[in-house]
Image (spheres, helix red, strand yellow):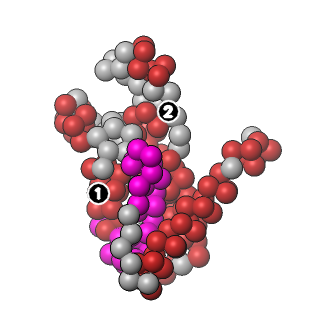
Amino acid sequence: VISYLPDTLWYETIVLILKSSFNIYNSINKDKNTVLIHCSDGWDRTSQLSSTSEILLDKYYRTLEGFIVLIEKEWLSFGHQFRYRNKFYSLIDTPTQITSENQFSPIFIQWLDCIYQLMNQNMTKFEFNMNLLTFLANEIYEGKYGTFLFNNDYEREKFKAKKKTV
Protein backbone atom coordinates (compact mmCIF):
# COMPACT_ATOMS: atom_id res chain seq x y z
CA VAL A 1 0.00 0.00 0.00
CA ILE A 2 2.79 2.42 0.91
CA SER A 3 4.39 2.00 -2.52
CA TYR A 4 1.18 3.31 -4.17
CA LEU A 5 0.94 6.40 -1.95
CA PRO A 6 2.96 8.71 -4.24
CA ASP A 7 0.51 7.96 -7.07
CA THR A 8 -2.38 9.34 -5.02
CA LEU A 9 -0.75 12.79 -4.77
CA TRP A 10 -1.87 12.86 -1.13
CA TYR A 11 1.16 14.78 0.12
CA GLU A 12 0.99 17.26 -2.72
CA THR A 13 -2.69 17.87 -1.99
CA ILE A 14 -2.03 18.46 1.73
CA VAL A 15 0.78 20.89 0.88
CA LEU A 16 -1.45 22.70 -1.62
CA ILE A 17 -4.28 23.08 0.92
CA LEU A 18 -1.88 24.39 3.57
CA LYS A 19 -0.12 26.79 1.19
CA SER A 20 -3.44 28.12 -0.09
CA SER A 21 -4.72 28.55 3.46
CA PHE A 22 -1.60 30.50 4.42
CA ASN A 23 -2.10 32.67 1.33
CA ILE A 24 -5.66 33.37 2.48
CA TYR A 25 -4.38 34.08 6.00
CA ASN A 26 -1.79 36.53 4.69
CA SER A 27 -4.24 38.21 2.36
CA ILE A 28 -6.70 38.81 5.20
CA ASN A 29 -4.40 39.33 8.16
CA LYS A 30 -1.45 41.16 6.63
CA ASP A 31 -2.79 42.75 3.44
CA LYS A 32 -6.27 43.49 4.89
CA ASN A 33 -8.00 42.14 1.79
CA THR A 34 -11.38 40.51 1.48
CA VAL A 35 -11.24 36.95 0.19
CA LEU A 36 -13.75 34.81 -1.69
CA ILE A 37 -13.15 31.06 -1.48
CA HIS A 38 -15.09 28.89 -3.90
CA CYS A 39 -14.37 25.66 -5.72
CA SER A 40 -16.50 24.32 -8.55
CA ASP A 41 -19.32 23.06 -6.33
CA GLY A 42 -18.49 24.85 -3.09
CA TRP A 43 -18.36 21.90 -0.73
CA ASP A 44 -14.96 20.24 -1.08
CA ARG A 45 -11.96 22.52 -1.48
CA THR A 46 -14.05 25.43 -0.26
CA SER A 47 -14.62 23.75 3.11
CA GLN A 48 -11.00 22.62 3.32
CA LEU A 49 -9.63 26.09 2.62
CA SER A 50 -12.11 28.14 4.61
CA SER A 51 -11.93 25.98 7.73
CA THR A 52 -8.12 25.73 7.64
CA SER A 53 -7.85 29.49 7.12
CA GLU A 54 -10.22 30.14 10.02
CA ILE A 55 -8.05 27.99 12.29
CA LEU A 56 -5.05 30.09 11.29
CA LEU A 57 -6.90 33.39 11.68
CA ASP A 58 -8.84 32.85 14.91
CA LYS A 59 -7.55 31.01 17.98
CA TYR A 60 -11.17 30.29 19.02
CA TYR A 61 -11.26 27.58 16.34
CA ARG A 62 -8.23 25.96 17.97
CA THR A 63 -10.28 25.35 21.13
CA LEU A 64 -12.38 22.22 21.51
CA GLU A 65 -15.64 24.17 21.35
CA GLY A 66 -14.44 26.29 18.44
CA PHE A 67 -13.30 23.26 16.47
CA ILE A 68 -16.72 21.64 16.85
CA VAL A 69 -18.43 24.89 15.83
CA LEU A 70 -16.12 25.12 12.81
CA ILE A 71 -16.98 21.60 11.64
CA GLU A 72 -20.69 22.25 12.09
CA LYS A 73 -20.48 25.56 10.24
CA GLU A 74 -18.05 24.86 7.40
CA TRP A 75 -18.76 21.18 6.78
CA LEU A 76 -22.20 20.17 8.03
CA SER A 77 -24.25 23.34 7.53
CA PHE A 78 -22.60 24.22 4.22
CA GLY A 79 -23.59 20.80 2.88
CA HIS A 80 -20.39 18.86 2.40
CA GLN A 81 -21.37 15.68 0.55
CA PHE A 82 -20.39 13.22 3.30
CA ARG A 83 -22.76 10.53 2.05
CA TYR A 84 -21.32 10.57 -1.47
CA ARG A 85 -17.69 11.25 -0.54
CA ASN A 86 -17.66 8.34 1.93
CA LYS A 87 -19.82 5.94 -0.17
CA PHE A 88 -22.71 5.81 2.27
CA TYR A 89 -25.35 4.72 -0.18
CA SER A 90 -28.59 3.41 1.19
CA LEU A 91 -32.22 2.71 0.43
CA ILE A 92 -32.73 6.41 -0.32
CA ASP A 93 -30.47 6.07 -3.40
CA THR A 94 -31.61 4.52 -6.65
CA PRO A 95 -29.16 2.26 -8.54
CA THR A 96 -28.77 5.05 -11.11
CA GLN A 97 -27.81 7.52 -8.38
CA ILE A 98 -25.26 5.13 -6.94
CA THR A 99 -23.63 4.67 -10.34
CA SER A 100 -23.76 8.33 -11.33
CA GLU A 101 -22.89 9.62 -7.88
CA ASN A 102 -19.72 7.58 -7.45
CA GLN A 103 -17.91 10.51 -5.92
CA PHE A 104 -15.81 8.79 -3.28
CA SER A 105 -13.09 11.13 -2.13
CA PRO A 106 -11.60 11.46 1.37
CA ILE A 107 -11.96 15.27 1.48
CA PHE A 108 -12.67 15.48 5.22
CA ILE A 109 -9.85 13.04 6.04
CA GLN A 110 -7.49 15.21 3.98
CA TRP A 111 -8.58 18.20 6.02
CA LEU A 112 -8.00 16.32 9.29
CA ASP A 113 -4.50 15.54 7.99
CA CYS A 114 -3.96 19.27 7.37
CA ILE A 115 -5.01 20.02 10.94
CA TYR A 116 -2.70 17.28 12.16
CA GLN A 117 0.20 18.89 10.28
CA LEU A 118 -0.58 22.28 11.85
CA MET A 119 -0.93 20.73 15.32
CA ASN A 120 2.30 18.80 14.95
CA GLN A 121 4.19 22.04 14.31
CA ASN A 122 2.28 24.15 16.87
CA MET A 123 1.23 21.80 19.68
CA THR A 124 0.76 24.52 22.28
CA LYS A 125 -1.61 26.50 20.04
CA PHE A 126 -4.39 23.88 20.12
CA GLU A 127 -6.69 23.02 23.03
CA PHE A 128 -7.33 19.52 21.65
CA ASN A 129 -4.95 16.81 20.51
CA MET A 130 -4.53 13.98 18.03
CA ASN A 131 -7.11 11.89 19.90
CA LEU A 132 -9.90 14.16 18.67
CA LEU A 133 -8.71 13.95 15.07
CA THR A 134 -8.50 10.15 15.33
CA PHE A 135 -11.97 10.02 16.88
CA LEU A 136 -13.41 12.11 14.02
CA ALA A 137 -11.63 10.05 11.36
CA ASN A 138 -13.09 6.88 12.84
CA GLU A 139 -16.56 8.37 13.24
CA ILE A 140 -16.74 9.28 9.57
CA TYR A 141 -16.80 5.59 8.67
CA GLU A 142 -18.48 4.13 11.78
CA GLY A 143 -21.56 6.35 11.63
CA LYS A 144 -22.33 5.74 15.30
CA TYR A 145 -23.57 9.29 15.86
CA GLY A 146 -25.08 9.90 12.43
CA THR A 147 -23.32 13.23 12.01
CA PHE A 148 -21.41 12.29 8.86
CA LEU A 149 -23.92 9.92 7.24
CA PHE A 150 -25.76 12.49 5.14
CA ASN A 151 -24.99 15.28 2.69
CA ASN A 152 -26.78 18.13 4.42
CA ASP A 153 -29.00 19.24 7.30
CA TYR A 154 -32.13 18.51 5.28
CA GLU A 155 -31.18 14.84 4.85
CA ARG A 156 -30.11 14.52 8.50
CA GLU A 157 -33.50 15.89 9.57
CA LYS A 158 -35.57 14.01 6.97
CA PHE A 159 -34.07 10.64 7.88
CA LYS A 160 -34.07 11.40 11.63
CA ALA A 161 -30.34 10.90 12.14
CA LYS A 162 -30.48 12.22 15.73
CA LYS A 163 -33.25 9.81 16.70
CA LYS A 164 -31.80 6.76 14.98
CA THR A 165 -28.21 7.13 16.20
CA VAL A 166 -26.46 7.70 19.51
Q: Is residue 145 above or below residue 73?
A: above
Foreground residue among 38 and 96: 38
Image-based side of 117 in relation to 11, left or right: left
Is residue 86 toward the left or the right of residue 69 in the image? right
Identify which amino acid the numbered label 2 is placed on: Gln
> The N terminus lies in which quarter of the figure?
top right
Three-letter residue code for mark 1: Lys
Vertical arrangement, residue 135 with respect to residue 41, above or below: below
Residue at position x 43%, y 33% from top?
Answer: 84
Q: Residues within 10 Å of mark 2 (few under 14, many from 20)?
A: some
Q: Is residue 95 magenta?
A: no
Give the number of the disc on residue 73.
Answer: 1
**Could you say where residue 64 lies in the image, as x and y percent from the top left?**
34, 68
> 129 or 48, which lies in front?
48
User: What is the quadrant of residue 142 in the picture?
Assistant: top left
Extent of the magenta region? 37-65
